[in-house]
Amino acid sequence: MLDDLDPILIQVTIPVPAAMIYAALTDPAQLKAWLGATATIELAPGGRFDLVFEGETPFESRGRITHFTPDVDIGYTWRGPPAFDALMNGEPPATSIYVRLQESPEGIDVTLEHTGWRNGEEWEEARSWHFHLWDEALHRMKDHVLRVAYG
């Protein structure tokens, strides 16, 4: 049996306090600004982490918070767009997101890990689509946080 696909790992470093970055990850107004999604978040274990995306690929990711430590990390279940319903949007959702903030000499390292990818061509396509989503999104988040911090 083949191993599952590697997790998506994306990192950006932002030279601002961790609390500013954490707010960008958990405040619905800020998520709208950089992720382009309307958010409903109940910051508690098992709380809602719902994102509604409009635009080129409209979809809803209705997730649950699996872990959080203020200004340090957050994890939640993830549902992908309709093209990947059969793969990843069952009960429970097949994939999950974990974002960790860690101090570094250049600022705060923000690492996003998207896990749960299985084998097969369809899974590879889903993983590739999500890799591009998260890569672009984290760079937009960095730009957003820097604008908030420095104008």
Image (spheres, rainbow, N blue to C red):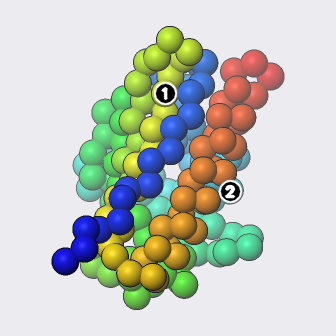
Which residue ends up furthest to the left in the rendered image?
1
Q: Nearer the viewer, mark 2 or mark 1?
A: 1
Residue 121: quarter of image: bottom left
Residue at 25% x, 74% y is: 2
From this viewpoint, which residue is outermost toward the front?
A: 1
Q: Does residue 56 sit above or below 82 in this rendering?
A: above
Count of number-bearing discs: 2
**The C terminus sits in image quarter:** top right
- Secondary structure at badge 2 equals loop
Observer able to see residue 43: no
Task: Give the label on residue 36, or none.
Answer: 2
Query: Element type at marker 1?
Result: strand
The amino acid sitting under disc 2 is Gly
To which residue does mark 1 refer? Answer: 109
Residue 104 in the image, given as x and y percentages of width and height: 46, 17
Q: Position of residue 10 (x, y in %)?
A: 50, 45
Task: Quadrant for the N terminus, please.
Answer: bottom left
Where residue 135 is drawn, which disc sits there?
none
Of 79 and 50, nearer the camera is 79
Q: Residues within 10 Å of mark 2 (few under 14, many from 20)?
A: some
